[in-house]
Image (cartoon, helix red, strand yellow):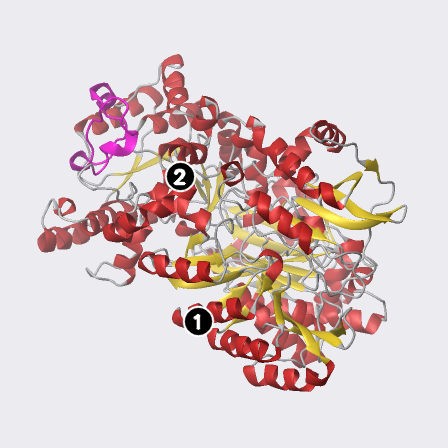
C-alpha cells in the first residue's frame, strides 16, 4: 500500500492508484466518443502503458511504440508493421531498444491498430509507462558463432515474468526499468547503460551471468555498477524479480518522480549494501565473481557474417538514422517470406536478416539495394544513431535525425567513408541516442540571443565509450552552431585518421580538452601564434563598438584586457569598469563559456593566447542561460533541497533578471514572502486580465503595504481584447473550450510573453499535486515556451497542507476568497468555490467536462495541457490572433 506521504508528494502514484493504467483500454470507446479534447489529462498519462505518447505539437496525434522482445520479428509480423506504417504516412522508426515506432495515430485508430498487432502476437503493453520496458538481447542470439550461449530462452522467461498483464505489480513500478540479457562476446546490447544487465560469462567451465545494476543516462549518467556475483541461467528470473521488487517496494523510490530511477537507489544504498539486501531475498547463495566479463571488441553486427549454422549467414541492413518507410518494410517482408528468413531489429537502429543461405547472398544484397538500403555504406554510417527528436518529440529542441544525416554526408564528402566511429545525436538531455557513450556525442540545446530569440546549437561530448572503454563522456564544447560544429568534427576526425592510432577512444584520450579544441578550431592556431585573444561582443553592446562584433587584443588579465578594450573602442570608455576596476552591472563577461563571476580569481584571471572573451548585456537575456544539461543536473540536485534553498539559488544567480509570478493564489504569497526575506528587492509581476476578482486587487495593495513590493502589472493588448469581444462576445468562454482557450490566450498568454521577454528566469507556484499535467514538473526547468529562460518551481513537491502551514506560521496575508471555499483562483467568471473533498481545480472552468484545467501559461510537455486545443487554434490562426 502506498503511503499518504507518497501520494501527496508524487501525484503520478495517486494517478496509478485511482485507476490502474492497464484498465484504461476498457474506456477507449468512451474516450473516442468524447473526442481527444474531452479526454481527462490523467487518462492521457495512463495511455502510456499501451505505448502511446503525444506527437508534437500535441493536437491529437500519438506515437505508438510497439514492444518487440529482443527485436525478434517473424515475416508476418514484419508485414503487419509495414502495412501499418504505410497507413500512417508511410513512416516508421527503429529504436535503440529494438522497438518499432509508428506516428500520426489518433485515438479512433487505436482499436483497429491494437487488434491488428494482437493477431500477429505483437503487443505495445510495457513499451512505455512505469514498467519494465522492452527486454533486449543480441540480435544474433541463437545464431552467432561466437556466443557463449543462446539467451533467447532466458529472454522468454523474463518476458513471462514482467510482461504478463495478470502480474499487475510489474506494471506499477516507480519509473521505467530497462533490462538486457546477453551472451554476446561483443556486448552489443550495451549492458553498461541498463538498470539491470545479465552479462554472460564462464566460471570454472560453467556458463552463467554477471549481474550489473544501476546504469542509466539522461542528464545524470551512470555506468552500471557490478555486483561481483555469478548467477546460473535458471536463476536469472528469480534475481531479476528480486532486484525489481527491492527497488519497487522501497517507498523512498516513489516519493519523487524525478529521482525514482534505480540508479539513485543504488547511489543511496551503495553497491555493497545493495548486494547485501539483494542476497537476503534470494533462495540461493550466488558464487562470487572475481573477474567481471569484458567484451572482446566493439562490434554491432554490421555487414555479412557467418552464422553457427553451416552454410548460412546473417546480413546487417543499415537504416540511416533509424528511419524506414512502410513500403520498404513490406518489400522486406516479401523477401523474408520467399527465402524463409528471420528478421531482427538491432540496438543501433538497424535491421538484420538471419538464415541467408550462401547461394542466396547475391540475390538478397541486390534486393536490399533495390528496396532502398545503402548496403555499401561505411561502418560509421551504419552504427551512428539519433533520437526521435523533432518533428515528433515534445522534449526535443533540435532535429537530431536531420542533423545526423547532414553531418554524415558532410564528413563522407570531406573524408570519404568512415570506419571505427560511432556518433550519437540527441535532441534533448534525455540521451535516448546515448550522446554520453558514443565516440562523438551531440546534444541539441538552445542559445538565447541578446534580443530574446533562440538558436538551436549543440553541445559536443567526447571521451565516452562502450564495452572495454565504457565511460561517461564529457562536454568539451557548448552551444556551438551546427554549421561550425560540422567543421570542428571534420578537423577532429581528420586528425584521428592521420594519427594511425587503433581507436578513436585512444586518440581522444591522448590529448587534453584544450588540445582537442585547438585541433577542432584549426584556424585558431594561426591566431594563437600571433599571440591574440578574441573578444566577441553581442547584441545591443555592438552600438558601443561601432558595430564590431569581434576584436582581437593581446593577452593579460581580464581586467587588463577590458581596460584595453575601453581604450581601443571609444564607445566603451567608462562603460565596462568603474573607478575601482570592478565590473559595471550592465555587462556580463564570460571567459571560454565560463561566467567570470564564478572564476576563483575573477577579473584577475589570466587570459592566454587563443582564449575567448564574450561580452553580453547583463539585462534581458544578456547572460547565456544554463543549458538543458546543466538545468537537469541542478534539478536532480535540488530535488533534495528545500523550497527556500531553491529560491535562494534563483535570486542569487538571476536577480534582478528574475520575476516571481503572482496571481493572488496562496502559493504565490508563500513565494513572495520567502523571497522577500531573502532579498527585499525581489521583482514580482502579474498579468491583469481585466476580469480578476476584487479580492485579488485588494490583496495586491496589501502586498505593497506589508512588504513594500510594488507588483509589476502587464495588461492584454486593448486591440486584441476589442477584436475578440466584438467577434465573440464578452463571455465567449462559456460557449466552447476552444473559445475559452482563445480568451486565455488573448488575456493571459500574450501579456505573459511580453513580461518574460524582459528576464532570464521566473519563479512559479506550480505543485505536482495540483493536476495531472503537472505531476512531473521539476524544481528547475528550461522554459522552451518563453525564450529558453529558466523556470523555477520551488514548491513542486509541496502539498496543499504544507502551503497553508507556512501561511499560518509566518502570518502571511492571503486572498480572502479562500475563506469562501475557493481553492484555485483566476479570473472572476472562470472560478468558483469547490465542495469539500472536491478536486481543488474543479473550480476552474467548472462548466467544461474533462477538459484540461490549464490556461496556457504553464503547458505540460507530457500531456499537452492547454496546447491540445490552443496550439491548433493559434497555429491555424483561426481567429486572426498571431502570437507576439
User: Where does the image place residue 584, in percent across and percent down from the top left?
Assistant: 54, 43
User: Where does the image place residue 56, in percent across and percent down from the top left?
Assistant: 40, 58
564 and 13: which is toward the camera: 13
Query: Relative to residue 860, is residue 564 depicted above or below?
Result: below
Write down the region rendered in magenta. 816-845
Q: Residues within 10 Å of mark 2 (few under 14, many from 20)?
A: many
Residue plotted at (76% across, 69% down): 420
User: Where does the image place residue 406, in percent across and percent down from the top left?
Assistant: 57, 73
Q: Please state which of the two labelled residues, at mark 2 or mark 1, is closer to the viewer.
A: 1
Does dot 2 land on a helix, a strand or a loop? helix
Q: Closer to the N terminus: mark 2 or mark 1?
A: 1
Q: Is residue 840 magenta?
A: yes
Q: Mark 1 — residue?
A: 83
165 and 327: which is toward the camera: 165
Q: Mark 2 — residue?
A: 774
Query: Relative to residue 700, is residue 440 depicted above or below?
Result: below
Residue plotted at (67% across, 63% down): 139
User: Where does the image place residue 344, in percent across and percent down from the top left?
Assistant: 62, 66
Q: In this image, 743 relative to 605: left or right?
A: left
Amino acid at each position: 500500500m502506498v503511503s499518504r506521504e507518497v501520494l501527496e508528494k508524487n501525484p503520478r502514484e495517486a494517478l496509478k492508484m485511482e485507476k490502474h493504467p492497464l484498465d484504461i483500454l476498457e474506456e477507449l470507446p468512451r474516450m473516442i466518443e468524447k473526442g481527444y479534447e474531452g479526454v481527462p489529462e490523467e487518462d492521457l498519462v495512463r495511455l502510456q502503458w499501451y505505448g502511446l505518447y503525444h506527437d508534437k505539437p500535441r493536437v491529437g496525434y500519438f506515437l505508438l511504440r510497439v514492444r518487440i522482445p529482443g527485436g525478434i520479428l517473424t515475416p508476418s509480423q514484419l508485414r503487419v508493421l509495414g502495412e501499418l506504417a504505410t497507413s500512417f504516412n508511410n513512416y516508421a522508426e527503429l529504436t535503440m531498444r529494438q522497438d518499432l515506432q509508428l506516428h500520426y495515430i489518433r485515438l479512433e485508430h487505436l482499436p483497429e491498430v491494437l487488434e491488428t498487432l494482437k493477431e500477429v502476437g505483437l503487443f505495445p503493453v510495457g513499451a512505455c509507462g512505469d514498467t519494465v520496458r522492452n527486454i533486449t538481447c543480441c540480435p544474433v542470439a541463437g545464431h552467432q558463432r561466437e556466443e557463449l550461449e543462446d539467451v533467447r530462452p532466458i529472454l522468454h522467461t523474463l518476458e513471462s515474468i514482467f510482461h504478463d498483464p495478470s502480474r499487475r505489480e510489474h506494471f506499477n513500478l516507480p519509473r521505467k526499468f530497462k533490462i538486457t540479457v546477453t551472451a554476446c562476446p561483443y556486448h552489443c546490447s550495451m549492458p553498461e547503460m541498463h538498470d539491470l544487465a545479465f552479462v554472460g560469462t564462464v566460471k570454472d567451465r560453467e556458463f552463467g551471468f554477471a549481474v550489473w545494476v544501476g546504469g542509466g543516462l539522461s542528464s545524470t549518467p551512470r555506468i552500471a555498477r557490478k555486483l561481483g556475483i555469478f548467477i546460473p541461467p535458471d536463476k536469472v528470473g528469480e534475481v531479476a524479480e528480486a532486484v525489481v521488487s527491492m527497488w519497487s517496494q522501497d517507498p523512498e523510490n516513489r516519493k519523487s518522480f524525478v529521482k525514482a530511477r534505480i540508479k539513485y537507489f543504488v547511489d543511496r544504498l551503495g553497491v555493497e549494501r545493495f548486494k547485501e539486501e539483494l542476497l537476503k531475498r534470494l533462495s540461493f547463495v550466488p558464487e562470487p565473481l572475481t573477474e567481471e566479463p569484458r567484451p572482446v571488441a566493439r562490434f554491432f553486427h554490421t555487414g555479412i557474417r557467418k552464422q553457427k549454422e553451416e552454410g548460412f549467414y546473417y546480413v546487417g541492413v543499415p537504416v540511416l538514422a533509424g528511419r524506414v518507410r512502410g513500403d520498404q518494410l513490406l518489400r522486406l517482408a516479401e523477401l523474408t517470406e520467399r527465402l524463409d528468413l528471420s528478421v531482427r531489429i538491432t540496438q543501433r537502429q538497424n535491421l538484420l536478416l538471419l538464415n541467408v543461405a550462401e547461394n542466396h547472398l547475391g540475390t538478397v544484397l541486390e534486393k536490399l539495394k533495390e528496396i532502398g538500403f545503402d548496403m555499401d555504406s561505411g561502418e560509421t554510417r551504419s552504427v551512428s544513431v539519433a533520437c526521435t527528436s523533432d518533428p515528433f518529440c515534445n522534449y526535443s529542441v533540435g532535429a537530431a535525425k536531420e542533423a545526423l544525416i547532414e553531418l554524415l554526408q558532410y564528413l563522407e564528402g570531406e573524408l570519404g567513408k568512415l570506419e571505427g566511429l560511432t556518433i550519437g545525436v540527441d535532441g534533448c538531455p534525455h540521451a535516448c541516442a546515448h550522446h554520453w557513450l558514443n565516440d562523438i556525442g551531440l546534444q541539441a540545446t538552445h542559445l538565447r540571443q541578446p534580443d530574446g530569440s533562440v538558436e538551436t546549437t549543440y553541445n559536443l561530448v567526447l571521451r565516452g565509450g562502450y564495452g572495454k572503454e565504457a565511460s561517461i563522456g564529457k562536454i568539451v564544447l557548448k552551444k556551438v552552431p551546427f554549421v561550425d560544429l560540422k567543421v570542428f568534427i571534420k578537423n577532429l576526425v581528420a586528425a584521428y585518421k592521420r594519427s594511425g592510432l587503433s581507436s578513436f577512444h585512444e586518440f581522444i584520450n591522448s590529448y587534453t580538452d584544450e588540445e582537442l579544441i585547438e585541433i577542432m578550431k584549426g584556424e585558431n592556431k594561426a591566431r594563437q601564434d600571433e599571440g591574440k585573444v578574441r573578444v566577441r561582443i553581442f547584441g545591443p553592446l555592438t552600438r558601443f563598438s561601432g558595430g564590431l562584433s569581434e576584436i582581437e587584443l593581446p593577452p593579460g588579465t581580464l581586467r587588463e584586457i577590458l581596460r584595453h578594450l575601453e581604450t581601443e573602442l571609444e564607445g566603451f570608455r567608462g562603460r565596462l569598469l568603474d573607478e575601482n576596476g570592478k565590473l559595471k552591472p550592465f555587462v556580463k563577461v564570460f571567459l571560454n563559456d565560463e561566467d567570470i563571476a564564478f572564476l576563483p580569481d575573477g577579473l584577475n584571471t589570466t587570459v592566454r593566447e587563443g582564449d575567448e572573451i564574450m561580452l553580453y548585456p547583463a539585462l534581458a537575456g544578456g547572460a547565456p542561460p544554463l543549458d538543458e544539461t546543466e538545468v537537469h543536473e541542478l534539478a536532480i540536485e535540488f530535488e533534495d533541497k528545500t523550497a527556500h534553498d531553491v529560491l535562494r539559488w534563483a535570486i542569487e544567480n538571476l536577480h534582478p533578471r528574475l520575476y516571481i509570478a503572482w496571481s493572488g493564489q496562496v502559493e504565490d504569497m508563500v513565494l513572495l514572502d520567502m523571497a522577500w526575506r531573502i532579498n527585499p528587492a525581489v521583482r514580482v509581476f502579474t498579468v491583469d486580465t481585466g476580469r480578476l476578482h476584487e479580492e485579488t486587487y485588494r490583496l495586491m495593495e496589501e502586498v505593497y503595504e506589508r512588504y513594500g513590493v510594488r507588483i509589476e502589472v502587464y495588461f492584454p493588448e486593448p486591440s486584441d481584447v476589442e477584436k475578440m469581444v466584438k467577434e465573440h462576445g464578452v463571455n465567449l468562454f462559456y460557449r466552447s473550450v476552444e473559445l475559452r482557450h482563445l480568451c486565455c490566450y488573448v488575456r493571459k498568454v500574450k501579456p505573459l510573453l511580453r513580461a518574460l521577454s524582459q528576464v532570464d528566469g521566473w519563479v512559479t507556484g506550480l505543485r505536482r499535486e495540483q493536476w495531472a499535467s503537472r505531476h512531473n514538473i521539476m524544481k528547475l526547468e528550461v522554459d522552451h515556451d518563453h525564450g529558453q529562460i529558466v523556470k523555477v518551481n520551488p514548491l513542486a513537491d509541496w502539498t496543499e497542507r504544507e502551503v497553508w502551514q507556512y501561511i499560518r506560521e509566518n502570518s502571511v496575508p492571503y486572498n480572502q476568497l479562500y475563506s469562501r471555499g475557493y481553492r484555485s483562483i483566476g479570473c472572476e467568471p472562470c472560478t468558483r468555490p469547490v465542495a469539500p473533498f472536491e478536486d481543488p481545480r474543479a473550480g476552474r472552468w467548472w462548466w467544461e467536462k474533462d477538459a484540461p484545467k490549464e490556461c496556457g501559461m504553464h503547458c505540460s510537455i507530457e500531456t499537452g495541457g492547454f496546447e491540445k486545443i490552443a496550439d491548433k487554434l493559434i497555429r491555424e490562426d483561426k481567429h486572426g490572433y498571431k502570437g507576439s
